[in-house]
Amino acid sequence: MSEGTGPITSAGEGEEVPQPFSVTIGATVPTGFEHTAAEEVHEKIGAVARVSKDRGRIYFEITTDNLPKVHHLKSVDNLFVVVEYYENYQFKDSKEEALLDFQQLAPTLPWTNALEVWKMNNSVKKKRSRRRGAANSKPKPSSDASDPEKLQTEPEALQEKEEQEDACAEQETDPQTEQDSEMQEQAENKPLKFRVTCNRAGDKHSFTSNDAARDFGGAVQEFFQWKADMTKFDVEVLLNIHNNEVVIGIALTEESLHRRNITHFGPTTLRSTLAYGMLRLCKPQVSDVIVDPMCGTGAIPLEGVIEWTHSFFLSGDNHDMAVSRTVNNINHIVKRRQDGGSASPGLPIDTAQWDLCHLPMRTSSVDIITTDMPFGKRMGSKKKNWDLYPSCLREMARVCRPGTGRAVVLTQDKKCFQKALVRMSGLWRKSHTVWVNVGGLHAGVFVLRRTGANFGTTPEDVREPHRAPESQEEDVQDKV
């Protein structure tokens, strides 16, 4: 029995599995949305998450039977299981002594539980991939499936079904499972391939990230007798260093989860995890009408329609290619739900091509607006933003419900947006701002509340868009 694991219990047919035990899971999240991610963890898993000193990471305790639920979190990019955490690690002054400490640290770490979780995680991923493969090979439903009475399954049933299958898959045996078991036994006889990835922040270290990864990795290799491989590795050991905080972990995700719903990318596709975080700030309610007037590839409405199934989403853009990408991404999700056996694969979402400043919608008909506005970098220009932003806020105020409507807007052109917001102060009030990192750019997510004033009764309704002074326009253009 592995040290630290629960007692072995029978799982039927002679199979033995360890009882659930507690481990610490670490997750990378969009910078600025740590507390939003912590709320989701508490809501869906019941765990209390701790925000790391290093921005963009959270940690929370789970029992291993909740491991499949962790992969259903929408606000996390990457997951790892913590081997050891040092809140105030004392680094030696000289480079040689600091690196020697890393070498001596590796064999003393409590690897057992973390490696057990890594094995469980591999098993979860294999079962989910086998289930998708089986779903893809299923024959098309018979004509009975078109019976309206049989299409009343709620969208949440699909996720519930997935969780039940995760729990019950261990009891199923088929030829493919037996073949996988034989291959696994053969693989266990071979040494694992691994690599060490070091993420370091702080200017008081006498070594580089490569130095730490090399020396720590050498000690790990000597301790486990694993084979180093930088590309085709089985195990990725993480060494995260932020000033004096050191966390050693084992990765549970091979690639970031933020790509989960997008198959047709545009020049500035928003990360799905960031889109989800923006939507959580809106706090969508049942029957809310939610609009993304500059949808790009549809990242925001796609995240919303999957999570908040009782709201209705509208997405649109003035560029025909953006609308086409959004439609293709929606069709991809619908097909995935059909292949997964959903009786009602349709989604409460629609897409249109429109002019942002003249939306084809009734006044006061929208509950929530959330969008990623042009930064003026890859799309548009900061000069054009001086006209676009006030016009956008005015039209958003027209279609949004007075008093209860809200908006969540992402932009890197903070100065221009804040000036536009001041000019639209009769229509919008800023609730708060979340500062985020988007592709290396410092951007802001502005949470706005619609004032109670009816559209058409304030000076802002008819005021011409503000234009920057000529000298200021030239200055902004030079910076771009």
Image (tube, rainbow, N blue to C red):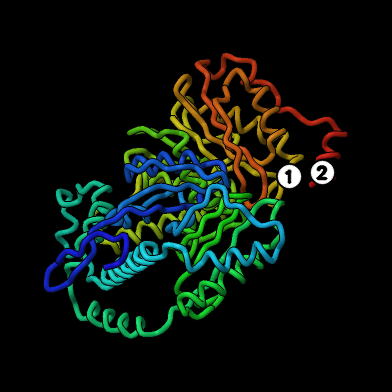
Residue at image mark 2: 477
Residue 176 horizontal/vertical position (percent): 24, 79
- Asked which secondary structure carries label 2, the reply is helix
Estimate how packed mark 2 is, as few (under 14), some (14 to 19) or many (20 or more) residues with alpha carbons within 10 Å: few
Residue plotted at (19% across, 56% down): 146
Q: Is residue 24 above or below residue 210?
A: above
Image position of 393 (left or right of 135): right
Is 1 left, or right, of 333 in this rendering?
A: left
Q: Are marks 2 and 1 in contact (CB under 8 Å)?
A: yes
Q: Which mark is residue 381?
A: 1
Q: Is residue 413 visible to the viewer in this orientation of the structure?
A: yes
Dot 1 lies on which element?
loop
Name the residue: 71% across, 52% down.
204
Circle 1 crowding by C-alpha within 10 Å: few under 14, some 14–19, many from 20:
some
Instruction: Tell me where residue 472 appears, x and y as whole percent.
Output: 84, 34
**Is 110 located above or below residue 396 in the figure?**
below
Numbered label attached to residue 362: none
